[in-house]
Image (cartoon, rainbow, N blue to C red):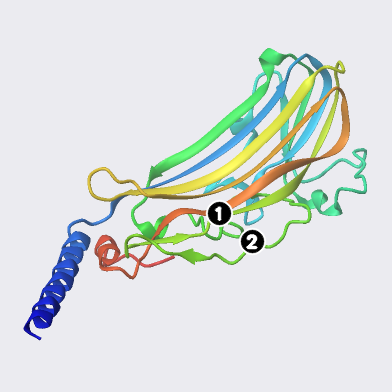
């Protein structure tokens, strides 16, 4: 009986020590150095020279406006030499919408790209990024529920509603983790040009957002979302095309605002919004 009591006492002491160590570990740091970043890429490449080019690609949209975060997209920010650009939500009537493309493209925002001739050395490429620190973790990009809160490509054809987020087990109580979700998607683009039959053409675009912060001296947790599409072909192209892509969200770890370490990181005068 005495031996059992000693074992019980040792076990209880072990549990108490573990709890104290855990509490000290949680209290030994406060998350800080909050950063958010958004990036938009559009790359159009031709392996050989092409002529009479007209391309319409969807732009990232938030709250009905072509935007990257709080920054509205303009032709000036997208302009490249040898190209004529226009941001438009009016698809010309002469660009006949075929049966595979819904009429909703008429109300979407497109970047209209025109050029008389494009050589491989003049391929179109643009990257716009807005990284920077944020005053509070409440100002982080919403990467769990991007649609309706962040810039995404519209329209999406036969796109299922994003699945409910599924929380998983985290190694520490101050972070939350979820099952990363990746939804295949189809994006309509209009491509018209003349080219040799061996010409390879690719159109790729991406909008993404991420949040990072610092824990301890060398840990930098991150969460992110991404919306992308890609289309490739060879030879001529004339009319509406379907680009394949992936909509990704709930990747990474997220602040658990109810934990003491995050409560210590939030300024008293900061309100969630």
Can residue 272 be seen here? The reply is: yes
Q: Nearer the viewer, residue 91 or 199?
A: 199
In the displayed structure, does residue 4 sit left or right of residue 97?
Answer: left
Q: Quadrant of residue 74?
A: top right
Q: Which mark is residue 249?
A: 1
- Residue depicted at x 19% and y 62%: 27
Location of residue 220 in the rendering, given as x and y in whole percent from the top left corner: 33, 46
Q: The residue tagged with tag 2: helix, strand or loop? A: loop
In the displayed structure, does residue 263 sit left or right of residue 148?
Answer: left
Q: Up-down: is 33 above or below 83?
A: below
Q: Earlier in the sequence, mark 2 or mark 1?
A: 2
Q: The residue tagged with tag 1: helix, strand or loop? A: strand
Location of residue 234 in the rendering, given as x and y in whole percent from the top left corner: 82, 24
Can residue 72 be seen here? The reply is: no
Q: Nearer the viewer, residue 94 or 189?
A: 189
Total of numbered circles in the picture? 2
Q: What residue occupies the far bottom of the structure in this picture? A: 1
Question: Which residue position is annotated with label 2?
Answer: 162
Location of residue 121 in the rendering, given as x and y in whole percent from the top left corner: 67, 13
Q: Nearer the viewer, residue 42 or 244?
A: 244
Q: Up-down: is 238 above or below 18?
A: above
Other residues around mark 2 within 10 Å, as few (<14) / some (14–19) / many (≥20):
some
In the displayed structure, does residue 77 sit left or right of residue 21?
Answer: right
Q: Quadrant of the C terminus?
A: bottom left
- Residue depicted at x 70% and y 23%: 45
Q: Quadrant of residue 18?
A: bottom left
Q: Nearer the viewer, residue 56 or 90?
A: 56
């Amino acid at each position: 009986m005495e031996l059992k009591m000693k074992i019980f006492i040792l076990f209880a002491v072990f549990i108490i020590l573990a709890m104290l160590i855990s509490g000290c570990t949680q209290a030994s740091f406060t998350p800080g150095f909050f950063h958010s970043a958004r990036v938009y890429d559009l790359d159009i490449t031709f392996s050989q020279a092409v002529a009479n080019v007209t391309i319409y690609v969807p732009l990232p949209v938030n709250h009905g406006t072509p935007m990257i975060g709080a920054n509205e997209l303009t032709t000036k920010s997208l302009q490249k030499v040898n190209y004529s650009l226009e941001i438009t939500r009016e698809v010309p009537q002469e660009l006949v919408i075929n049966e595979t493309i819904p009429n909703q493209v008429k109300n979407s925002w497109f970047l209209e790209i025109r050029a008389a001739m494009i050589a491989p050395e003049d391929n179109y490429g643009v990257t716009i990024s807005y990284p920077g620190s944020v005053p509070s973790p409440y100002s982080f990009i919403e990467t769990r529920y991007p649609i309706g809160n962040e810039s995404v490509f519209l329209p999406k054809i036969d796109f299922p509603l994003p699945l409910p987020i599924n929380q998983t087990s985290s190694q520490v109580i101050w972070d939350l983790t979820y099952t990363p979700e990746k939804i295949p998607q189809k994006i309509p683009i209009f491509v018209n040009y003349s080219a040799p039959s061996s010409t390879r053409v690719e159109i790729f675009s991406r909008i993404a957002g991420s949040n990072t912060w610092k824990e301890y001296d060398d840990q930098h947790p991150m969460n992110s979302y991404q919306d992308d599409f890609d289309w490739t072909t060879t030879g001529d192209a004339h009319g509406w095309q379907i680009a394949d892509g992936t909509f990704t969200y709930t990747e990474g770890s997220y602040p658990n605002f109810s934990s003491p370490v995050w409560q210590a990181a939030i300024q008293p005068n900061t309100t969630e919004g």
